[in-house]
Image (tube, rainbow, N blue to C red):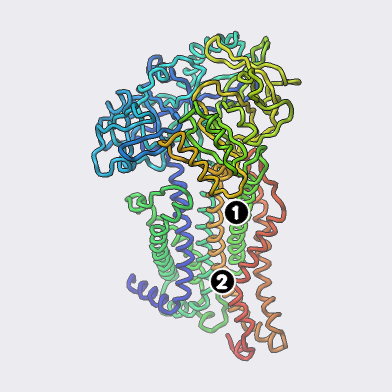
Amino acid sequence: MLKSFFVSILRVIRKQPGYIAINVGGLAVGLASFLFITLYVYNELSYDRFHKDYENIYRIKIVGRLAGGVLDQAVTSAPMARTLLKDYPEVVQTTRVIQMGDWLVKFGDKKFNEQHVLFADSTFFDVLDFKLVKGDPKEALVRPRSIILTEEYARKYFGDKDPMGEKMVFEADTSLYTVTGVVRNIPDNSHIKFDMLASLSTYPGMAGEQFWLSNNFYTYMTVKPGTPKDKFQDKLQEMVKLYVGPQVKEVTGLSFEDFKNAGNDFRFVLESLKDLHLKGATQYNLEPPGSLSTVYIFTVIGILILVVAIINYINLATARSASRAKEVGVRKVSGASRGGLMMQFLIESVIITAIAAILAIIVVYFLTPSFNHLTGKELPVAIFSTPLAVFLIVALIFFIGVSSGIYPAFMLSSYNPSEVLKGTMSPGSMSKRLRGILVVFQFMVSIIIIIGSIIVYDQLNFMTRKDVGFNKENLIIIRRADAFYKQLESFRTQLLEIPGVENAGFSRAVPGVYFNNNAFFKDNDPEKNAYLINQTNVSFDFPATLGVQLKAGRFFSHDYGSDSLAILINEAAVKSLGLTDPLGQYILQPNGPNKWTRLRIIGIMKDFNIESLHKAIAPVCFTIDRGGRGDEFASIRISGKDVAGTLKEIEKVWQKFTPDMPFQYDFFPDRWKFLYLTEMKTGKLFLVFAFLAIFIACVGLIGLVAYITNKRTREIGIRKSYGASSVVVLGLLSGEVLYLIIISSLLAYPVAFFGSRYWLQGFASKVSISPAIYILATMITLLIGWISISYQTIKAAGYNPARALRVE
């Protein structure tokens, strides 16, 4: 029997190669799309699960509220880790990680300004399971000035030479770090990424700090298996009362109970390591977090594309049923049972699906590098070779083969042999309504994805073009101006002598880079309410260089000696502080226990964005850097004329002041667009999958039109014999398709509307959704649909009436 089945299948392939190619092609595209989306979703859901004990690893975050400002910070204080280990028997081990900006690193004649350098406790490898290929994980970070390199960076600096024990220069020539380990390259699905990992013991003052209100460390811990998360989290609030409360009283004069009664809150919350990427803290993350809504959306798109491909198979199979009706009649007359015929058609379907799956896997293997470039990820295509993946793919083949073949098999096997052989039965007529429903579903999915793609791109254009409150254009940002911090004014003076330079200023942070979210207090406030304001230290000329606008008051000026203790705040900060006449008033900044800095408000800046439009405009303040090494960024406003020449002159001045430090600059608009890199990649993915969904739907539409033209051949002949033109016949055949696409649009609109609203919830500022977007999506679908069926319809409209009337 099996031999008979395979002979029958080979005969179908030989007789109908076009039909098989279209069917296999549609299924292969659908399966490849589904597999790509599966890789993407798997990568997003697998973050940090390569650590052997990830189920028992947590990070501590701070959640709270200060005078209406929200805290959701991934960072905690220096003493947190040791206190957890000392006070809580549930805790097995703790470790801390801190990021301290860029570092100039040199070895021999190689020197680079490295951005991905982390400092960590010696217990780092006791908690987190990054694999050392050289060195002892217990000892590698114990001694001060120890450094671990990734395999990639070991090759970058040392080539094939063994780096162990070698000395690398960090910043000053006298600051030597010893290479004590080489770690495997950090997996793409890790929220902790670094190129170099240095020992935190290098800075004992910072590591041993006991101020609980200064939060700069990422604190991780391993707990005993079986520790209930919620109960343990409740116990952590004891730390707030024991350690945070007394320091709050030192700073504010309020007991912690009074502090909370004033509407404030401060809590420690456990974050499971496996959930950090998609559900972690929203402030001060080591890496940009993922989007759970995007994962949900792409999961749904992947399933829908697979369903569309299955529908496509059903449409094509039933449309071709007429050509196999006599075969079924002959087989039944010869004694074939209905069950045997169903089995034959199901096996055909499974084999076709298997061929499509093999082609899809080949496509995925070859196109994964391009897909990785599109997504910015390193998706593990090798996962398909694992036993579990092979089993799941085989199961998927059988599922798709059976689910897509069950209806055609049922329909074909149900033909009455006597009616078929006498020509009194019209094969496929019973499936016309179902086929229409399936095509409607296909195009509904396509229209939803098209609308989603348009809205994503509209939102991206809105975010990148919206007025952010300062002048983004012709602004250059140079990193590491702190390399010659004592000579910044001299550097600025020489920059202004360059014809193309209009202004220059320096700052600890720039928009798009994390500002410090610090607590401030109003002067003479008896309630001592704390107010969170995003702060950065700046030079006198930075606000004017950035291009922020004044609403009242003035900028910093060298003409006022007291401006070293002055502050600029924006409108949002004025509103947060509740000030009615802020100019000339003072606000207080804590500077350690019972220490305050009294700052006089000299100017009110109009609101501007320091973060992406995902977040609302925050309270912001600028203060003068009073002798610290805080001015990391140089911001230079250029005229926009002869940009290349201006950059060369700026570089010459830079090299006069710091010949060792590489000249690294960015145009600010490019830096700003980087904030929306995830959305840009999402938009491109939407566009790709929209095209694929439409392609599959059009293949199904070809099957529908083939069926329609086959059914109406005699009608066409009669109409043409009575004088109907080809244009009339073309409209007649296209009308049914037009009707189905309009129905698809009406069903797609509400789904696309609510889906778009769900995605746009992640933005504080968002584009308005115009009804024109929905109409445009329908018009695109109509155009593509008409083009895809034009050959069949024009061919049918051109039939010779005499030949058409002879068709049975």
Mark 1: which amino acid?
Answer: Ser
Q: Is residue 508 above or below residue 760?
A: above
Instruction: Classify residue 736 as left or right of residue 323.
Output: right
Q: Residue 95's spot in the image, x, y percent? A: 38, 25
Q: Quadrant of the N terminus?
A: bottom left
The residue that appears at 38% across and 27% down in the rendered structure is 120
Badge 2: few (under 14), some or many (20 or more) residues near its Cα, within 10 Å?
Answer: many
Closer to the chain start, of discs 1 and 2, is: 1
Give the label on residue 204, or none.
Answer: none
Q: In this view, does 751 lie above or below 497?
A: below
Q: Residue 489's spot in the image, x, y percent? A: 55, 29
Instruction: Classify residue 77 as left or right of residue 425.
Output: left
Q: Residue 466's spot in the image, x, y percent? A: 66, 44
Judging depth in this view, the residue of 515 and 654 nearest the camera is 654
Instruction: Classify residue 605 as left or right of residue 122.
Output: right
Q: Give the residue at mark 1.
A: 453
Badge 1: few (under 14), some or many (20 or more) residues near its Cα, within 10 Å?
Answer: many
Q: Quadrant of the C terminus?
A: bottom right
Mark 2: which amino acid?
Answer: Ile
Q: In this view, does 683 lie above or below 354?
A: above
Q: Give the residue at mark 2.
A: 702
Q: Residue 635's spot in the image, x, y percent? A: 56, 36
